[in-house]
């Protein structure tokens, strides 16, 4: 099933032919979709996931599941952006080898883009390409100037609004490498308007946002409290979009490799979940809750979904 496609008469006919419930114009329900990640709690491969293993609520009300598609094989298409904080100190250079190995190990169906947080924008040094060697030519040390990103949440919003591809058949995943500190609001504030805007823009664009915490060790060190705040804000973004936030205390990790290995495993265990949601008169973001009842497994699902009048919406 195509992602984020507005229903036309032809699309509805195709769904009926495929045996998927469709809703006539004026109905009080519409189709919606989300990307979920399901993993075993141990190193084993999780058992095949079935629709009956899941329960969905939209806006606090139970929703019927209409489809569950493993995002593998013909549906393995993925657009992945590695978004690096332009304010990161040059000590991040020791992690470049781990990033290179991760990108080189991605499947041929994954298109990679390398971008840097600069002055509130996501600036691409390499547009999407499935040529991993070409993508890695754009990987370089950031400038390392304190505050040059403006705010990581400005940059994420910019990326979501100007995603450099119109293809909505593929998953969209972002890996933010940053300390998550918003210089315009240094305390931990879940209602930070820039944070909330970044979350909502990501949900509208259908992004799954992962993050790797990288603390600046230089003379512009913001302090333990502010860096804990940054970690917490990054976690909120990942939870809202169904991603994963990686961090190790207040210090920097010895290596990105364990995080990137885990991320690679996550990308191989994602599903497109279809369900119905209450119809809206205009696009709205609703709370989403997905519960997994399969034993010895865990799920990461977005906490928000955009509901599009008369069509399919994606988290």
Image (cartoon, rainbow, N blue to C red):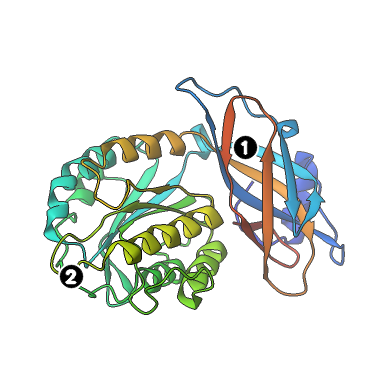
User: Residue reaching furthest top?
Assistant: 44
Horizontal side, residue 261 vs residue 91: left or right: right
Closer to the chain start, of discs 2 and 1, is 1
In this rendered view, identify the residue nearer to me: 140 or 213: 213
Horizontal side, residue 203 vs residue 61: left or right: left
Q: Which quadrant would residue 227 be assigned to in this image?
A: bottom left
In this rendered view, identify the residue nearer to me: 200 or 12: 200
Residue at 44% from the left image edge and 71% from the top image edge: 157
Measuring from the top left, give residue 207's x and y in whole percent.
Answer: 49, 57
The reply to whether residue 167 is visible in this rendering is: no
Vertical side of 150 occupied by 200: above or below? above
Q: Which mark is residue 69?
A: 1
Q: Which quadrant would residue 224 be assigned to in this image?
A: bottom left
State the separation of the CA atoms marked 2 and 1: 46 Å
Vertical side of 97 occupied by 231: above or below? below
Residue at 17% from the left image edge and 63% from the top image edge: 142
* Label 1 residue SS: strand
* Label 2 residue SS: loop
Horizontal side, residue 306 vs residue 66: left or right: left
Give the residue at mark 2. Answer: 220
Q: Which mark is residue 204?
A: none
Vertical side of 185 occupied by 21: above or below? above
């Amino acid at each position: 099933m195509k992602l984020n496609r507005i229903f036309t008469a032809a699309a509805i006919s195709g769904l009926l032919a495929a045996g998927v419930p469709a809703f006539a114009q004026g109905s009080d329900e519409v189709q919606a979709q989300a990307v979920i990640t399901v993993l075993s709690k141990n190193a084993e491969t999780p058992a095949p996931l079935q629709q009956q293993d899941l329960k969905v609520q939209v806006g606090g009300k139970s929703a019927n599941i209409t489809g569950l598609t493993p995002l593998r094989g013909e549906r393995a298409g993925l657009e992945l952006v590695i978004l690096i904080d332009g304010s990161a100190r040059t000590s991040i250079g020791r992690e470049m080898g781990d990033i290179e190995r991760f990108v080189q190990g991605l499947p041929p169906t994954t298109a990679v883009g390398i971008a840097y947080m600069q002055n509130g924008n996501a600036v691409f040094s390499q547009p999407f390409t499935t040529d991993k060697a070409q993508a890695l030519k754009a990987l370089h040390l950031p400038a390392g100037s304190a505050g040059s990103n403006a705010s990581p949440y400005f940059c994420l919003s910019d990326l979501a609004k100007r995603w450099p591809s119109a293809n909505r058949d593929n998953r969209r995943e972002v890996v933010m490498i940053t300390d998550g500190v918003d210089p315009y609001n240094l305390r931990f504030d879940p209602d930070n308007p820039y944070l909330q805007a970044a979350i909502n823009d990501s949900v509208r664009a259908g992004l799954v946002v992962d993050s790797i915490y990288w603390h600046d060790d230089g003379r512009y060190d913001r302090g333990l409290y502010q860096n804990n705040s940054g970690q917490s804000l990054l976690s909120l973004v990942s939870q809202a979009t169904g991603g994963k936030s990686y961090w190790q205390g207040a210090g920097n990790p010895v290596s990105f490799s364990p995080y990137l290995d885990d991320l690679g495993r996550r990308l191989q265990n994602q599903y497109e979940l279809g369900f119905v949601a209450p119809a809206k008169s205009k696009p709205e973001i609703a709370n989403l809750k997905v519960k997994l009842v399969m034993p010895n497994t865990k799920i990461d699902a977005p906490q928000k979904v955009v509901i599009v009048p008369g069509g399919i919406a994606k988290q």
